[in-house]
Image (cartoon, rainbow, N blue to C red):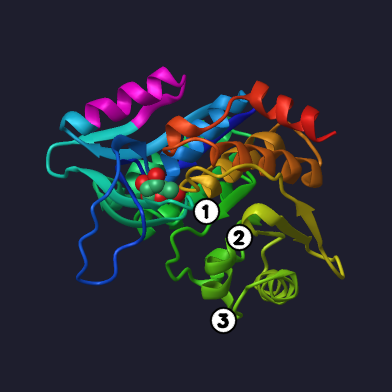
Amino acid sequence: MSKIVVVGSYVVDLTARTPHMPKPGETVLGGPFKMGPGGKGGNQAVAAARMGAQVTMVTKVGKDLFGDDAIQNFKNEGIDSQFINQVEDESTGAALIAVDDSGENMIVVSLGACGTITEEEVQKAEEAFQEADIILVQLETSMAAITTTINLAHKLSKPVILNPAPYQKVPDELLAKVDYITPNETEAGLLTGVEVTEVDSAKKAAEILLEKGIDTVIITLGKQGCYLVQKGEKTGKVIPGYQVQAVDTTGAGDAFNGGFAHFMAEGYSIEEACKLANAVAALSVTKSGTAPAMPYAEDVEELRGEAR
Ligand code: RIB
């Protein structure tokens, strides 16, 4: 069984459907409202666990109803929650999400407790890091948590995946210790200064990231799939995505990252892990919500069977 440590955010997602995105100053009469578990870290942990991974989650929540729910939700998913710190002095974070009729989303995330994870709180999980096959971290938490995670993984020679979402500036010395980086087009643009709109610009951005010392760059390209290139390769390749009817694209990147971490930890080739991660992402957009919309291993098998 693959063992994964995820360090990152847990927030409550407050999602409203809307016929169109409001302009600044506009109020739109929306459709149904849903509240549920979210946060990029939590979503990725659930995606990996539903693929069959043994996941340890490192995060921080408030001593409030949302925090209690968080811990219960992780337990229900079979995720080890011993390094989820529940504190009095911070509230559990929340994300305000609007999803329009085409399934596209806009998000404002207020990190609350998970934005205050300290170096010590990550260090406490060192034993779990030691036992893990792979470590997964995003940028939706404190820089202390991100830095400590990458440094600890590097010290223990554990492969680390950085999903640079949402974009924050990361020092080049830290990026040089990252094994796999998985930006979407927007994040790849912000990290490199290259506007990424299609495969050629993705190639240019990926070259810049490889020059920073990262071993493997995977730029996710929405329904087109992802662009994969590794250190020492002259050129990378597009791993095509699956065509599905999108209901809600929120959390698709998280589905990809959780799936990718699991399949890499299971020893699949990198191309196969990308293909399977594309399938996890595609299935996640066919349902509303984020963590609750993550597919299970049998759903991925079924989609792959249909595509053959
Ligand atoms: O990637 C989607 C996630 O980003 C949502 O669940 C929301 O919580 C935001 O953090």
Amino acid at the residue labelled 1: Ile
Total tally of numbered discs in the picture: 3
Horizontal side of residue 3 vs 226, given as left or right:
left
Q: How many C-alpha atoms fall within 10 Å of the one at disc 1: few (<14), some, or many (≥20)?
A: many
Q: Residue tagged by mark 1? A: 150
Kindly identify the residue that appears in the image at 59 percent across and 79 percent down.
195
Measured along the vertical axis of the image, is residue 307 above or below residue 97?
above
The mark found on residue 177 in the picture is: 2
Q: Residue tagged by mark 3? A: 193
- Would you say the beta carbon of the disc 1 residue lies within 8 angstroms of ligand 1? no
Q: Position of residue 84 (x, y in %)?
A: 33, 33
Highlighted magenta segment, given as a residue range:
67-83
Tell which residue pokes out farthest to the left in this image. Answer: 89
Label 1 secondary element: helix
Q: Position of residue 26 (x, y in %)?
A: 22, 67
Where residue 48 sits, quadrant-wise, is top right
Amino acid at the residue labelled 2: Lys
Q: Nearer the viewer, mark 1 or mark 3?
A: 3
Q: Position of residue 245 (x, y in %)?
A: 60, 42
Where residue 61 sits, quadrant-wise, is top left
Amino acid at the residue labelled 3: Gly
Per the model, the C-alpha gap separating discs 1 and 3 is 23 Å
Label 3 secondary element: loop
Determine contact: label 1, label 2, CB under 8 Å.
Answer: yes
Horizontal side of residue 181 vs 291, given as left or right:
right
Kindly identify the residue that appears in the image at 81 percent across and 41 percent down.
269
Query: Which of disc 3 and disc 1 is earlier in sequence?
Result: 1
